[in-house]
Amino acid sequence: MCGIVGYVGEQQAVEVVMDGLRRLEYRGYDSAGVATRDPDGRLVVHRKAGKLVNLEKVLDADTPAGTLGIGHTRWATHGAPNDRNAHPQVDCSGAVAVVHNGTIENFEALLAGLEERGHAITSETDTEAVAHLIEERYAGDLAETVRGVCKDLTGSFVLVVTHRDAPDVVIGARRNLPLVVGLGEGENFLASDVTAFIAHTRTARVVDQDQVVELRRDGVTITDLDGNAVDGETFTVDWDTAAAEKGGYRFFMEKEIQEQPLAVRDTLGGRLGADGLLHLDELAISDEDVRGIEQVFIVACGSSYHSGLVGKYAIERWTRVPVQVEMASEFRYRDPVVGRNTLVIAVSQSGETADTLEAVRHARAQKAWVLAVTNTVGSTIARESDAALYTRCGPEVAVASTKAVIAQIVAMYLVGLYLAQLRGTRDPDEVRAHLHDLQQIPDLIAETLTRMGPIRALAGEIAEAKRVLFIGRHVGYPMALEGALKLKELAYISAEGFPAGEIKHGPIALIEPGTPVVVLATRHALSAKLVNNVQEVRARGARTIVIATDGDDSAAPYADHLVRVPDTKSLYAPLLLIVPMQVLACEVAKVLGLDVDQPRNLAKSVTVE
Ligand code: F6R
């Protein structure tokens, strides 16, 4: 949520910063801005409402020179997305420029004090308070000034700051939100995530809670808020720029959908031993403690929550340990009963989602074991958990999650099988057989991707619908939720997912002649009941789009449109069912002429509660 870049080096800063912002635009895209220090020692600030392309036009007409700069792409929290509220925010004298991700909770009190002391406040942002505080307190040491200001801020923030009178330094600071340093040769970078600078360097350093970074051309110093030097952990980014490019596709989402067989393969890779069993070395919780677990909570948001729901079916089936899946935003506020016998699994692609992070903190404070399932190495959720199981699907750029969700579902199966293996609730041969089946999934997803013609053909019809319902039973139910979420976030069509058995208790009233109902009709013990539900909606005029497994003809007679996916064990069906729904949402958005990668009002990484 908001993308931030800082640069000091030998290249033209505006080019480096804009290139970084392009790669971070998925984090927010309602306005953008850059500040550079030009060769005459002036701070030049450009800000523009709308997507980055609007700022690009401004910069094309008036390109600022200079080798030090900061930039921002915004997802608005305080103040409408207009030029005035875009970042960088500046002080009264134009000497200080600040970009900010997060929310400063005490900004009203700070601004009131600043106004009393004669500062002219020109925006509706919380960020502007920081610029004026730095203006007031700067006495020649920008890092020291920022450390002092940070102590007076409550809330969450990443700040990147430049000052006209500090010609060769950019300062970064963080609390609760991500900030990484890129270490180059004669140049250094600050960014919300590594994608912003991997074209220049793959060596990165983590910035931890309440730390301040002094970024210079020839070096980087990190301190705590008292000015004590700290050693940041350095790591190498193991993917390159190609992984973060569109690779010939019109949209990142299309590319990421196609990458799903690889995402599953990479998430399974290296975790199956020669004995055919699971080896999750990263699960840094002792075998004894894993055996002591009496209940599991899965906490997550959005699509990751849907992955968690699939996890519940798998973990309960294989381990007989009770599993509850909770929206992370609700978890801590209802004071859940968790303790040392509890495993909390936090599922998050970004590893930075504020709701999930707070759930993790709450769980750890209650002494529960916390396992992060995340795609982002070194993310805050990974670092604050007892252990992290990484979904290794590479960078996901499209705001709507696809390959990360598939990889999360695979990770859920791995956790379930691992618990079963360790606790002895499943015979080793059965675990081996499951793992063998999972290894077939990449090919089955690839096969599913070749069958998307009928879905694409349907897009025009669905684009005209007022509302669309998705129904499924068992593991088809979380996928119904996921199908509905994808369609509403990408195509802005009202869509709801329901357990098929539930629609007669109310939602069936939504059905009018012609209402599309997508039926996730996988083969399982409830197939016959699902067929009844399909007949019920059809009798009320619904047009049914049935996604059925090869060889299962039970719902076919009631399908206005029939889409087939390959057969697999019913528990693994979500990994195939999800594909037509992703393609459907993507194609409908395309028909409607919408921006598939950057749907309105959304951001990829939601770092506010
Ligand atoms: C939907 C989507 C979101 C995310 C949710 C959680 O396509 O992407 O619903 O799943 O915001 O994000 P993470 O997984 O980063 O915690």
Image: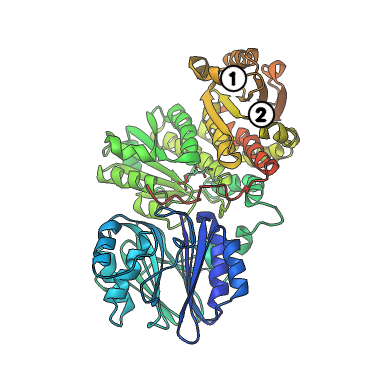
> Residue 429: image x %, image y %?
52, 32
Q: Badge 1, how many Cα within 10 Å: few under 14, some, many 20+? A: many
Q: Nearer the viewer, mark 1 or mark 2?
A: 1
User: Residue 301 lies in what quarter of the image?
Assistant: top left
The residue lying at 69 percent from left, 57 percent from top is: 247
Relative placement, left or right, of 185 versus 424 is right
The residue lying at 39 percent from left, 62 percent from top is: 123
Task: Look at the numbered disc 1 and give the secondary structure of its residue.
Answer: loop
Q: Nearer the viewer, residue 374 or 272?
A: 374
Relative placement, left or right, of 567 versus 454 is left
| Disc 2 target residue | 567
Dot 1 beta carbon under 8 Å from ligand 1: no
> Residue 435: image x %, image y %?
55, 37
The residue lying at 70 percent from left, 41 percent from top is: 591
> Residue 460: image x %, image y %?
72, 35
Can you tell which mark lies on residue 511?
Answer: 1
User: Residue 468 lies in what quarter of the image?
Assistant: top right
User: Residue 562 lies in what quarter of the image?
Assistant: top right
The residue lying at 55 percent from left, 72 percent from top is: 16
Task: Compute the Cα span from label 1 to label 2.
Answer: 30 Å
Q: Is residue 153 above or below residue 389?
A: below
Tags 1 and 2 in contact by the CB under 8 Å rule? no
> Residue 121: image x %, image y %?
35, 65
Q: Amino acid at mark 2?
A: Asp
For marks 1 and 2, the one nearer the N-term is 1
Dot 2 beta carbon under 8 Å from ligand 1: no
Q: Nearer the viewer, residue 50 or 243?
A: 50
Q: Is residue 425 above or below residue 355?
A: above
